[in-house]
Amino acid sequence: GDSVTQMEGPVTLSEEAFLTINCTYTATGYPSLFWYVQYPGEGLQLLLKATKADDKGSNKGFEATYRKETTSFHLEKGSVQVSDSAVYFCALSNDYKLSFGAGTTVTVRA
Amino acid sequence: GAVVSQHPSWVICKSGTSVKIECRSLDFQATTMFWYRQFPKQSLMLMATSNEGSKATYEQGVEKDKFLINHASLTLSTLTVTSAHPEDSSFYICSARDRGCTDTQYFGPGTRLTVL
């Protein structure tokens, strides 16, 4: 079946540091790929998505590129802020069902 | 943007009672809604898929008589936890798929259920 594997956390960074969270997937067909973010005490928010190979999703300074050859969708941000502290979930959609990775907790220190 | 609300945001109940959680899409029509359960520090587990006007499809291992789902309209789905027990305590999250956008789900803020 479909599955998503993402980098285990927690990740602790200083403000303005570079952030990368690795995500790889296994799926049949041509899934869409997503990154969701969950701030403390809140529900999930869509951060960015990509629907086909080589697409790059971007939002709020975050980027991820759909790499079919490596079945990856790594999340990157060049300069993180304290407000980026959250749990980040990589997910894929196949046949309209979402499969989530385990989540990566990111803490950014001032 | 697409907004999904849940009510209540938290509920505490006694063991044996039933609890209903509502999920509404506020500014779009959702032909499909999904119910997830999230344990502390863990990922979301899909419980069931709810299609407007038809019976919900439950994931393996989820008791359909325990977790009753009704999707009566294009903007409302409800999850009723029947005869709740402490092990049902969890964070329940719904999501809705925009009728016009096939692969993006918008999530509600979640409902924290605590069963005493």
Image (tube, rainbow, N blue to C red):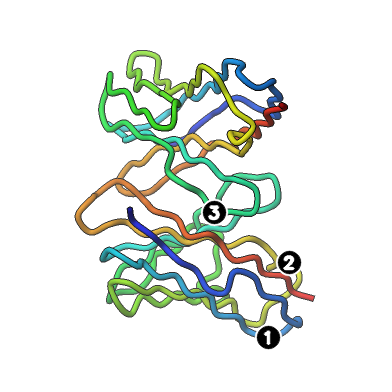
B62 versus B77 height, above or below? above
The residue type indicated by label 1 comes to: Thr
Q: Which residue is mark 2?
A: B87
Left or right: where A90 falls relative to B92: left
Q: Which residue is mark 1?
A: B17
Chain under numbered label 2? B
To the question of a shared chain for discs 2 and 3, the answer is no
Chain under numbered label 1? B
Mark 2 vs mark 3, foreground winner is 3
Check residue A43 in the rendering and tell me which mark sits there, or answer none: 3
Residue A50 sits in which quadrant? top left
* Quarter containing the C terminus of chain A: top right
Q: Circle 1: is it few (<14), some (14-19), or many (20+) Cα within 10 Å?
A: few
The residue type indicated by label 3 comes to: Gly
To the question of a shared chain for discs 2 and 1, the answer is yes
The residue under the point 34% across, 13% down is A69
Among all residues in the image, which is located at the extreme bottom? B17
Mark 1 vs mark 3, foreground winner is 3
Circle 1: element type: loop
Q: Circle 3: is it few (<14), some (14-19), or many (20+) Cα within 10 Å?
A: many
The residue under the point 40% across, 23% down is A64
Q: Is residue B31 visible?
A: no
